[in-house]
């Protein structure tokens, strides 16, 4: 069982989208049983909230349900995951600051690093204060990133060979 936590700032837009997308891809590929997927925020601002309606609606249009409730990522959570996937560089630095040790720090990666068509240091842009287009773009970026991440994990962990 491989455990992954996607992390953004509020855990209501980008990381719930990545979580929903990853679960959707895993289901399509019959790999659900081999993974545990969660998401969290570096802030406490939206704890308990469902995903933003704008994220939910663009994902629903493509048949992807977003079912998470917002939670905050704590230092102790590093021990619960094999991979901690940050949506942007700010989230990555926040995670690095609370990582308890080198083993934890090594679990942190930027999502877009796994998309071969992106610059590996690119952010998933924060859509919160923008228009509907931004949410569609976040969804596209999450799909490309999660597809790349899964390819990487399948090869790294010899899944489906
Ligand atoms: P997220 O987006 O980090 O993708 O969930 C945001 C959600 C809320 C806020 C900022 C970004 N906020 O300022 O409340």
Image (cartoon, helix red, strand yellow):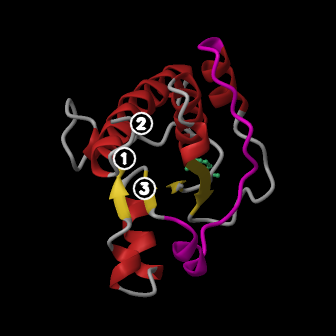
Residue assigned mark 2: 146
User: In the image, which residues are magenta?
Assistant: 61-81
Classify mark 3: helix, strand or loop: strand
Q: Which mark is residue 86?
A: 3
Q: Main secondary structure of the magenta part?
A: loop
Q: Residues within 10 Å of mark 1 (few under 14, many from 20)?
A: many
At a point 77% along the width and 43% down the height, the residue shown is: 50
Distance in Å between CA atoms under marks 2 and 1: 7 Å
Report whether residue 89 is seen: no
Residue assigned mark 1: 111
At a point 37% along the width and 64% down the height, the residue shown is: 108
Placement of 69 over or under 125, stated as above or below: below
Quick check: marks 2 and 1 in contact, CB under 8 Å? yes
Locate the C terminus by quadrant: top left
Locate the N terminus by quadrant: bottom right
Distance in Å between CA atoms under marks 1 and 3: 6 Å
Q: Is residue 58 left or right of residue 121?
A: right
Classify mark 2: helix, strand or loop: helix
Task: Give yes or no for residue 42 being in the magenta stretch.
Answer: no
Placement of 111 over or under 27, stated as above or below: below
């Amino acid at each position: 069982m491989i455990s992954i936590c996607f992390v953004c700032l509020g855990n209501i837009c980008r990381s719930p989208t990545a979580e929903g997308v990853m679960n959707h891809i895993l289901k399509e590929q019959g790999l659900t049983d081999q993974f545990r997927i969660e998401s969290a925020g570096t802030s406490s601002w939206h704890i308990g909230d469902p995903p933003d309606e704008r994220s939910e609606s663009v994902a629903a249009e493509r048949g992807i349900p977003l079912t998470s409730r917002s939670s905050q990522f704590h230092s102790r959570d590093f021990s619960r995951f094999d991979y901690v996937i940050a949506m942007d560089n700010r989230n990555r630095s926040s995670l690095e600051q609370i990582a308890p040790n080198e083993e934890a720090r090594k679990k942190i990666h930027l999502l877009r690093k796994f998309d071969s068509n992106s610059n590996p240091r690119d952010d998933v842009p924060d859509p919160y204060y923008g228009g509907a287009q931004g949410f569609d773009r976040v969804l596209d970026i999450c799909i490309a990133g999660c597809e790349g991440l899964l390819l990487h994990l399948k090869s790294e962990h010899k899944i489906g060979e």
